[in-house]
Image (tube, helix red, strand yellow):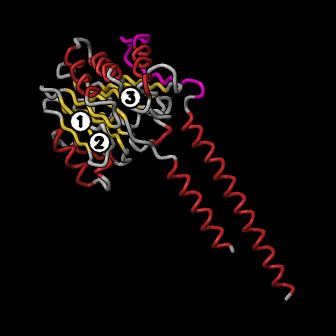
């Protein structure tokens, strides 16, 4: 009886664990500023959780995006490759070669002083594409898009923008939204978006293992510019909200960390909390049953 109960508990835990894994689909812009040495990523998606798990930033060296079916170890692997002096293409090749499901992944990498590189696995859902600018300073990739134009428009907007790196990243992200963005969101294009930019002296940022809970800048060291928004389904376009938040921020500040979540929008995070409480209840109930079973078995033994 007791072993069978433990098997049931493990099965329930595994089932719920699988159910809360991050979904795929997104488009992202990875870029560097050769003059300032800044590196950054802007990303948007039609999901019910923050997308701060997509960017990987190695200050003064380069940046990357890990998306589609997100690989938890990819952040550390990309950061290690870039810190070791890998080119963008070498970094992509290293990560793809040791991934357990490379056909489900999508990566984009840009390195200061080097061309960008990308990877789109054969099993990522259409429209899935990755491309780089002619000068190699920006890589854009996306999956489950309305069309290739989401990526093409983002690259064109980045190249046409004359502002600082954050402004150019946002211009590219919004241009992708103007072309339809994530195909699952209709005119809203995306429900989650993030802008993360690192200056040369910032710490490495690689939290692809953060899951649906995202990255909270109040308890995690993040780069100089960190903005994450999560909006209600059917509400604002997330890239537009991201731009509004950046425009309202103190752009001259040494550190900007803003996390804006609409009431009711963080359904995935709430779901994780509900599941956690449920599992605790199941484990407590299971433990109680086990204790009762042991006590009863001992009582029976005494009466034999």
Quadrant in the picture for residue 68 = top left
Give me the residue at 52% from left, 27% from top. Answer: 233
- Residue 294 at least partly seen: yes
Indicate the quadrant containing the C terminus: top left, top right, bottom left or bottom right. bottom right
Compared to residue 296, the image places residue 271 above or below, namely above
- What residue sits right under mark 2 in the picture? 106
Q: Looking at the rendered structure, which numbered label has been put on residue 44? A: 3
- Residue 221 at least partly seen: no
Q: Which label's residue is closer to the chain start, 1 or 2? A: 2
* Residue 144: in magenta span: no
Could you give the CA–CA distance between mark 1 and mark 2, rounded to whole angstroms? 8 Å
**Circle 1/circle 2 CB separation < 8 Å:** yes
Count of numbered marks? 3
- What residue sits right under mark 1 in the picture? 130
Quadrant in the picture for residue 295 = bottom right
Along the viewing direction, whichever of 157 and 88 lies nearer the viewer: 157
Q: Which label's residue is closer to the chain start, 2 or 3? A: 3
- Where does the image place residue 266, in percent across and percent down from the top left? 55, 32
Which residues, given as a range, are shown in magenta? 247-264
* Residue 254: in magenta span: yes
The crowding category of the residue bearing disc 1, from other C-alpha atoms within 10 Å (few below 14, some 14 to 19, many at least 20), is many
Give me the residue at 62% from left, 62% from top. Answer: 9
Along the viewing direction, whichever of 94 and 107 lies nearer the viewer: 107
């Amino acid at each position: 009886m007791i072993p069978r109960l433990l098997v049931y508990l493990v099965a329930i835990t595994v089932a719920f664990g699988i159910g809360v894994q991050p979904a795929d689909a997104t488009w992202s812009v990875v870029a560097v500023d050769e003059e300032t040495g800044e590196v950054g990523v802007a990303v948007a998606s039609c999901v019910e959780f923050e997308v701060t798990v997509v960017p990987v930033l190695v200050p003064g060296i380069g940046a990357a995006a890990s998306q589609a079916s997100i690989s938890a170890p990819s952040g550390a692997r990309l950061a290690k490759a870039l810190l070791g002096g890998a080119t963008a293409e070498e970094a992509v090749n290293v990560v793809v070669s040791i991934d357990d499901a490379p056909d489900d992944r999508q990566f984009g990498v840009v390195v200061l002083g080097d061309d960008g590189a990308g990877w789109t696995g054969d099993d990522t859902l259409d429209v899935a594409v990755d491309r780089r600018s002619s000068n190699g300073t920006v890589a854009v990739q996306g999956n489950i898009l309305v069309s290739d134009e989401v990526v093409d428009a983002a690259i064109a907007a980045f190249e046409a923008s004359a502002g600082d790196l954050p402004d150019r990243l946002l211009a590219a992200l919004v241009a992708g939204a103007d072309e339809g963005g994530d195909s699952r969101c209709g005119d809203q294009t995306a429900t989650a978006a993030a802008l993360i930019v690192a200056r040369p002296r910032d710490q490495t940022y690689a939290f692809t293992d953060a899951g649906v809970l995202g990255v909270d800048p109040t308890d995690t060291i993040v780069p100089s510019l960190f903005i994450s928004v999560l909006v209600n389904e059917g509400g604002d376009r997330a890239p537009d909200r991201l731009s509004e938040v950046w425009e309202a921020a103190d752009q001259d500040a040494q550190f900007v960390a803003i996390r804006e979540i609409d009431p009711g929008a963080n359904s995935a995070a709430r779901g994780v909390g509900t599941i956690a409480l449920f599992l605790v209840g199941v484990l407590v109930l299971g433990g109680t049953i086990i204790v009762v079973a042991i006590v009863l078995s001992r009582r029976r033994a005494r009466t034999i």
